Amino acid sequence: MMAAARPSDAVLAEFGVLATHREEPLNLPGGRGLTWRAADIVLRPSSGDGETLWKANILAHLPHTSAFRTPRPIPSASGGWTIDGWEAWHWLPGQTDETRVTDVLAAGAAFHRTVADLDRPDFLDAAVDPWARSDRIAWEEEDLPPGGTLERLATAFRAVDAPAQIIHGDLLGNVMFEQGQPPTIIDWAPYWRPVGFADAVVLADAACWHGLAPSEMLRLADERADGRQYVIRALVFRIATFHLLGVWDAEMEARHIPAVTAALS
């Protein structure tokens, strides 16, 4: 994969890179090759939309605990969170580990307690990307794409009795671990759903992609009220996304069938 264009010197100057760090920014392997790091500053392309600005305003002041932390956004010299299509964040060390399912769930629980009182942001209503649409599909707010696996799962939809709040809907690959430090939660994917749904996405992702046994997925799900129902909806969320992206095929179906079968058992 070819790296995206490096942020310009003007952008680097706006975020204080040229004034404090003389080395050339390094292209990072994650983030689809679009992210750059200069010492303790990470820069990445930004749409500068309502979601971007909302997250920056929240994460700039979000209290951290011994159970989690988040990177802080860096304002530009002009005073905004974005400049010329870029945003900047303080770099924090750590590595993701998708096999540490219970540790990810614990960090997510601490994060969700901290953001529980936030109001529902308006930008959620305007989102029409495949992930936003699949979230609505999983909660019966938009029609299912055609597909036997989705239809099987949808027959098992039941109402859940839990309040919605802002959640991180993609935690498993976005919690970094560093010895002696709280887990770092990155790349917040905001949705307005019960916290149990965020947990279930972790479990479904781990079972379909990272070796978690479907029986263990169910055991962990059943520790939560309506846990299996959340797993069913999490599987619909992920599978519907693959449909909308045009990448659902026989290989994808085979990867998901063990978790689907377990969830419907």
Image: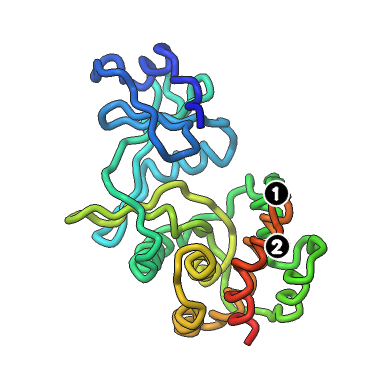
Q: Is residue 148 above or below residue 156?
A: above
Look at label 1 and name its amino acid: Leu
88 displayed left or right of 131 = left
Query: Foreground: 64 or 180?
Result: 180
Residue 160, how many percent across, how many down? Answer: 63, 79
Disc 1 element: helix
Query: Foreground: 258 or 50?
Result: 258
169 displayed left or right of 97 = right
Quote the CA–CA distance across marks 1 and 2: 15 Å
Disc 2 element: helix
Which mark's residue is nearer the viewer, 1 or 2? Answer: 2
- Point out the residue furthest to the top here: 10
* Quarter location, residue 22: top left
Q: Is residue 63 above or below residue 51?
A: below
User: Does residue 63 appear in this view?
Assistant: no
Give the total number of marks visible in the rendering.
Answer: 2
Q: How many residues crowd mark 1 within 10 Å: few (<14), some (14–19), many (20+)?
A: few
Residue 163, how many percent across, how many down? Answer: 57, 71
